[in-house]
């Protein structure tokens, strides 16, 4: 026989609905990611001879070359990220990984994040995020990518 006592009832298993500002933020983040991928589609990551670039694709947007490369002659931790995104959206996975494998992983993660943002905003709940754990999940993802970027950079510098 079920108990009528509210204290004895089981806790709610579905997360509460996302607030208005959370939904707006999810849509804004999703929109920004759409812009990032649109830029990756717009940029041509190949040289005039058809060979893939390994970095400096961002200069086609009028941005200057990487200061670290100019001053130190070695790539910075994020060198090749724009190129890896642009290669990946063209299906050139091997060259995307060669340009910057962390950038390739970031692009795949951001593609999933883009879908997650829109799906969560439409459904009015954060999929796959336990209640109250959003900050932890975000910290793990950002920290993990920073560790990968710096690890890749150190490996490039010592070779």
Image (tube, helix red, strand yellow):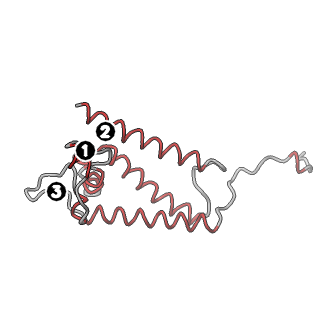
In front here: 20 or 145? 145
> Residue reaching furthest front?
71
Secondary structure, mark 1, is loop
- Residue ID for mark 3: 46
Tell which circle, 1 or 2, labels the residue nearer the N-terminal end. Answer: 1
Taking the image as shown, residue 74 lies to the left or right of residue 35, namely left
Residue at x-position 63% and y-position 68%: 20
Labels 2, 3: front one: 2
Q: Residues within 10 Å of mark 3 (few under 14, many from 20)?
A: some
- Residue ID for mark 1: 75
State the separation of the CA atoms marked 1 and 2: 8 Å
Report which quarter residue 125 is drawn in.
bottom right
- Count of marks, rendered view: 3
Residue at x-position 66% and y-position 49%: 132
Q: Position of residue 46 (x, y in %)?
A: 16, 56
Tell which circle, 2 or 3, labels the residue nearer the N-terminal end. Answer: 3
Report which quarter residue 120 is drawn in.
bottom right
Question: Could you tell me if the residues under marks 2 and 3 are in contact, i.e. CB atoms within 8 Å?
Answer: no
Question: Could you tell me if the residues under marks 1 and 2 are in contact, i.e. CB atoms within 8 Å?
Answer: yes
Residue 10 versus residue 85 in the image, above or below: above
Report which quarter residue 24 is drawn in.
bottom right
Labels 3, 1: front one: 1
Secondary structure, mark 3, is loop
Taking the image as shown, residue 145 lies to the left or right of residue 65, namely right
Secondary structure, mark 2, is helix
Return the mark for residue 153: 2
Q: Residues within 10 Å of mark 2 (few under 14, many from 20)?
A: some
Tell which circle, 3 or 1, labels the residue nearer the N-terminal end. Answer: 3
State the separation of the CA atoms marked 2 and 3: 23 Å
């Amino acid at each position: 026989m079920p108990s009528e006592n509210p204290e004895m009832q089981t806790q709610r298993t579905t997360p509460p609905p996302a607030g208005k500002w959370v939904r707006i933020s999810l849509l804004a983040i999703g929109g920004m990611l759409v812009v990032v991928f649109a830029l990756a589609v717009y940029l041509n990551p190949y040289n005039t001879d058809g060979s893939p670039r390994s970095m400096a694709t961002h200069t086609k947007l009028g941005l200057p070359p990487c200061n670290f490369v100019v001053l130190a002659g070695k790539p910075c931790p994020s060198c090749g990220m724009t190129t890896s995104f642009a290669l990946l959206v063209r299906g050139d996975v091997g060259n995307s990984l060669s340009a910057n494998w962390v950038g390739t992983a970031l692009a795949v993660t951001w593609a999933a994040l883009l879908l997650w943002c829109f799906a969560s905003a439409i459904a009015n709940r954060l999929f796959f995020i336990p209640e109250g754990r959003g900050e932890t999940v975000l910290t793990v993802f950002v920290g993990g990518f920073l560790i990968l970027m710096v690890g890749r950079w150190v490996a490039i510098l010592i070779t």
